[in-house]
Amino acid sequence: MTHNLIKIAPSILAADFGRLADQVAQAQEAGADLIHIDVMDGRFVPNITMGPAIVEAVAKVAAIPLDVHLMIVEPEKFARRFADSGADSISVHVEACPHLHRVLEQIEAVGCRAGVALNPHTPAATLGDVLDNIELINVMTVNPGFGGQTFIKGMISKLRKLRAMVDNSGKDIEIEVDGGINIDTIAAVIAAGATIAIAGAGVFQHERGIAAGIDALRQRAARTTDYGAV
C-alpha cells in the first residue's frame, strides 16, 4: 500500500490572519487537499483561537474540504454550529468526551465526517470500540494548544499501532498527523501509515511562500513509497 500521494492539510493556525482569505486561496491553488482549522477554548488546552465565524469565512474561499479539530470541552454542544458554518469533518478529543460514541453519532447526524483526536499520552487502544463510528483519526504528535512545537518521535509507534488496527478492521479510516510536520518528519509518518499530513508553519511560514511549502512536502513525500520505506 503506497502513501506517496499523502494528503496535505495546511493548518491556518500558522496563517497571517490579516490576509487569511488570500492565504487560504493560495494554499488551495498550490494543491492543498484540505484546510485544517484548530479550535481551542482555553479550557481543554491553554490557548484560545477561533470559532464558527472563522470556519464560515474560510468556507467562502475554499472549495476543498474543511477539517475542523475541536480542542474544546463539551464539543457535542457545537457540532451543529460548526457543520452549519461549513465544516466537512469534525474531530473531537477522546479525552474531552466521556460519552464518545454519542458525540460521534451526533457529528455524523449533522452531515460531517466524524473524527477522533488522541493526545500524545492517550494509547491507540482507546479507539478499539469506536472504529465503526469514525472516518478519521487525528494523532497529535505534539501536546495540543500551540503551533510551532517540536515533533514527538515516540508517536511513530502509536501511528504504527493505529495503522494496524485500521487495516485489520477493514474500515476506510484516514489517519492524520498533527504537530511538527515538515520536510524532516513527513517521511517517517508516511512510513508509519499516516494518510493526511497537517502542516502549519511548514506551509504558511515557509521562507519561499505557501506554494513552495506545499511543494517541498510533496517532494519529500514522493520519496516515501510504502510503509517502512523512507
Image (tube, rainbow, N blue to C red):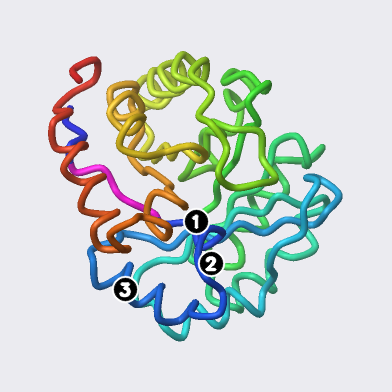
Q: Quadrant of residue 118?
A: top right
Marks 1 and 3 close (CB-CB < 8 Å) = no
Question: Which residue type carries mark 3?
Answer: Gln
- Residue at 29%, 54% (x, y): give it: 213
Q: Is residue 221 left or right of residue 47?
A: left
Res. 113 mark: 1
How far separated are the C-alphas under marks 3 and 2?
27 Å
Question: Which residue type carries mark 1?
Answer: Arg
Question: Which residue type carries mark 2?
Answer: Gly
Q: How many marks?
A: 3
Decide: few, some or many residues near mark 1? Use Cα within 10 Å; few <14, some 14-19, many ≥20: many
In the image, is residue 100 part of the stretch drawn in magenta? no
In the image as oriented, which residue stretches furthest toward the bottom? 60
Disc 2 target residue: 111
Q: Is residue 178 above or below residue 122?
A: below
**In which quadrant will I find the C terminus?**
top left
In the image, is residue 8 part of the stretch drawn in magenta? yes
Res. 26 mark: 3
Decide: few, some or many residues near mark 2? Use Cα within 10 Å; few <14, some 14-19, many ≥20: some
- Residue at 42%, 57% (x, y): give it: 205
Q: Which segment is the magenta one?
A: 5-9
